[in-house]
Image (tube, helix red, strand yellow):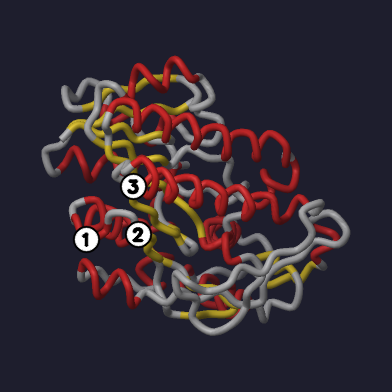
Amino acid sequence: MKYLVTGGAGFIGSHLTDALIARGDSVICLDNLSTGNSHNIEHLVGNPSFEFISGSILDVGLVDSVVARVDHVLHFAAAVGVFTIVDKPLESLVTNLRGTENILEAAHKHGAEVLIASSSEVYGKNGGGPLNEESDRIVGSPLKSRWSYSEAKAIDESMAYFYYQEKRLAVRLVRFFNTVGPRQVGHYGMVVPRFVSAALAKEPLTVYGSGSQSRCFCHVYDAVAGVLAVIDSDATLGEVFNIGNDDEITIEDLAREVIEQTGSSSVIEKVLYEKAYAPGFEDMQRRIPDITKIKRTVGWSPKRDLSVIISDIAEFLRTAH
């Protein structure tokens, strides 16, 4: 099969590109390198199964011409990270909404199948038990930039789903819960590489708020395996699936785990949210995925635990410098 991976030089997109090529597919990577990194794909340059196109998903003509050449579109290009969303809310909204609309329209025109990469951010501040695909969204004011990413991703999902319902476009949706691993960088607000990087440098690990907020972290290799399982199954058409690990840990315990596993002398420093973000910043206390649906439908579940994640990120950071 021939795939277009938008955002293919990004963290998840580049690993997905590697996996597709490794199994014999060919990939066109479309990326404007705003948050992606050419280092993530440099090992593929010269591979006959790989083509890189520097460009934006906002370029309607470019998107149309590239989608016309492929069987599947895996749409991963987006404005990412809490810092990016809070600092540049308008640019982020335009990229995430208009970009997805361009992809869906081109895919419908040319008969390509589409997978839309969404996010657990769609649940907003719903801090209840494990969140399943039907769980309610709870978001703050639409005037708070913090929730603009959640809004955009929810609209992306709705748009894709109604293309499936009304226009019979072959659409699949996945929601990622805190995907982490090699190639991820900390300066967009990603907590695990930020902690590991600080620990390796023997600098303080900054924990925002009380540190009692909890998350679940999924290794990117597991997440990519989940995506492949979803796109390879006819049973997933028109459906949305959570992709994540349901092993929960508080952010303060995560910091301790990173320090211990890396053998670091770093200390933990707690910082008020107001000092890290704009006043009135809202976060969710708990976010844990219910992955029953994807297990039942395609038999996927994560295989790597937090210790493997920390080890792989640490190894990547050591060799990257």
Report whether 65 appears left or right of 59. left
Q: Secondary structure at mark 1?
A: helix
Q: Marks 3 and 2: CB-CB under 8 Å?
A: no
Kindly indicate the quadrant of the structure image that contains residue 238: bottom left
Looking at the picture, which amino acid does disc 2 mark? Glu
Residue positioned 40% across, 51% down in the render = 182
Distance in Å between CA atoms under marks 3 and 2: 8 Å
Depicted 148 relative to depicted 105: above or below = below
Number of labels in the image equals: 3
Q: Marks 2 and 1: CB-CB under 8 Å?
A: yes
Residue positioned 47% across, 53% down in the render = 118
Where is residue 187 shown, x and y percent of the image? 62, 47
Where is residue 73 shown, x and y percent of the image? 32, 36
Q: Marks 3 and 1: CB-CB under 8 Å?
A: no
List the residue tagged with mark 2: 239
Q: Quadrant of the N terminus?
A: top left
The disc at residue 235 is 1
Classify mark 3: residues with Cα within 10 Å, few (<14), some (14-19) or many (20+).
many
* Residue projecting furthest to the front: 166
Where is residue 290 shown, x and y percent of the image? 42, 77
Q: Secondary structure at mark 3?
A: strand
Q: Secondary structure at mark 2?
A: loop
Looking at the picture, which amino acid does disc 3 mark? Val
Kindly indicate the quadrant of the structure image that contains residue 14: top left
Q: Earlier in the sequence, mark 3 or mark 2?
A: 3
Q: Earlier in the sequence, mark 3 or mark 1?
A: 3
List the residue tagged with mark 3: 171
Q: Nearer the viewer, residue 34 or 143?
A: 143
Classify mark 1: residues with Cα within 10 Å, few (<14), some (14-19) or many (20+).
few
Residue positioned 39% across, 60% down in the render = 240
